[in-house]
Image: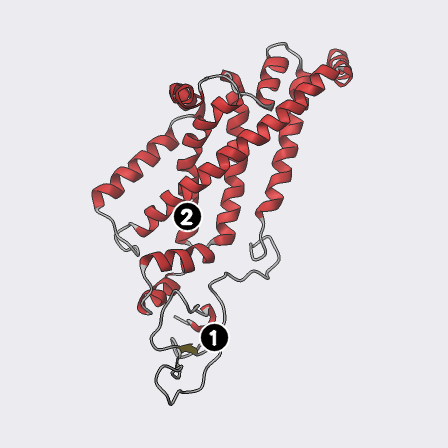
Amino acid sequence: MDKFMQQMREAFANEALWKEFQTGIWDTIYSTVAATLVACVLGIILGIILVAGEEDGVRPLPGPVMKVLNFAINILRSVPFLILMIMVLPLSELLVGTTIGTVASIPPLIIASASFVARLVETSLREVDKGVIEAAQSMGCSPFQIIWKVILPESLPSLVASFTTAFITILGYGAMAGAIGGGGLGKIAINYGYYKYNYAVMLIAVVFIVVLVQIFPVTGYLPGHPDGPPHHQPGWAKKAPPERQPADEPGQAQPRRHVNFGGGGKAVALPPPLFCAEYAIDRSAFRL
């Protein structure tokens, strides 16, 4: 215990070490944010394909294509990150010209986390009420319109919470990358702490990582999330446009026809002809 306290005092008095910590914090944030952004973009694309391309999806794809995609995602999720990073190091050298450092750890982080994010996105998209999707299909919406104007906005709170989980996971992956040449706080904890038996340095690095993990999830709760204020309403769930008076002359607006879905809900004014791209659906109208 006396040795640990002595190491702690030396660590707090070491200005060079604190400069290393400052650099390590920035490298950790930089690599984690960069990898998370790219992984989320890839994950959204893959997740949409997994949901929309299934047999009863809005845009079914051939069965062999879906089987190959699911198999590839499952394989990437099954490989431990450290082993996957070692396997992807040649790709890092090809892309960034080096296999050591913070930048070199970003491609393995993206590859390892993209499949994970894809499954999170798939789970979030599957939570959307099937009745809303079927109603949009019956009103003439194209597959792209259903995905862009119905499924994604409706699942937005769940998606943001999933991306927060992905950020924390990628932050942990980045810390592990310090064991094989990655940068950031993980490198400091291993090189200056574990290898030198300086547990005070390792503890300080862990504390900084924990602080980052506690700070960033705060941004992951949008209004409407179960843990946030219940004021969120998806962008597509807007009230129907105001009704116009019938037109007597050609070229002017025609009257809207009110339709009540399910008999127990609020009527929706449908313009003739109905274009899903221009008119929003009031979710409260569907009592399926």
Q: Secondary structure at mark 2?
A: helix
Q: Which is nearer the eye, 213 or 248? A: 248
Within 10 Å of disc 1 (Cα), the crowding (few <14, some 14-19, many 20+) is: few
- What residue appears at the point 44 percent right and 50 percent down from the top-left corner? 124
Q: Which is nearer the eye, 60 or 276? A: 276
- What residue appears at the point 78 percent right and 16 percent down from the top-left corner? 13
Which quadrant holds residue 168? top right
Locate the C terminus and report the quarter of the image it occupies.
bottom left
Looking at the picture, how far across and down is residue 285, in whole percent? 44, 73
Which quadrant holds residue 73? top left
Seen in the image, is 112 located left or right of residue 182?
left
- Amino acid type, callout 2: Thr
Identify whether 204 is placed above or below 248.
above
- Amino acid type, callout 1: Pro
Locate the N terminus and report the quarter of the image it occupies.
top right
Looking at the picture, how far across and down is residue 255, in whole percent? 39, 84
Q: Nearer the viewer, mark 2 or mark 1?
A: 1
Identify whether 267 is placed above or below 137.
below
Within 10 Å of disc 2 (Cα), the crowding (few <14, some 14-19, many 20+) is: some
Q: Secondary structure at mark 1?
A: loop
Residue, disc 2: 123
- What residue appears at the point 71 percent right and 15 percent down from the top-left corner? 16
Distance of label 2 from label 1 (alpha carbons): 33 Å
Residue, disc 1: 241
Looking at the picture, how far across and down is residue 198, in whole percent? 67, 13
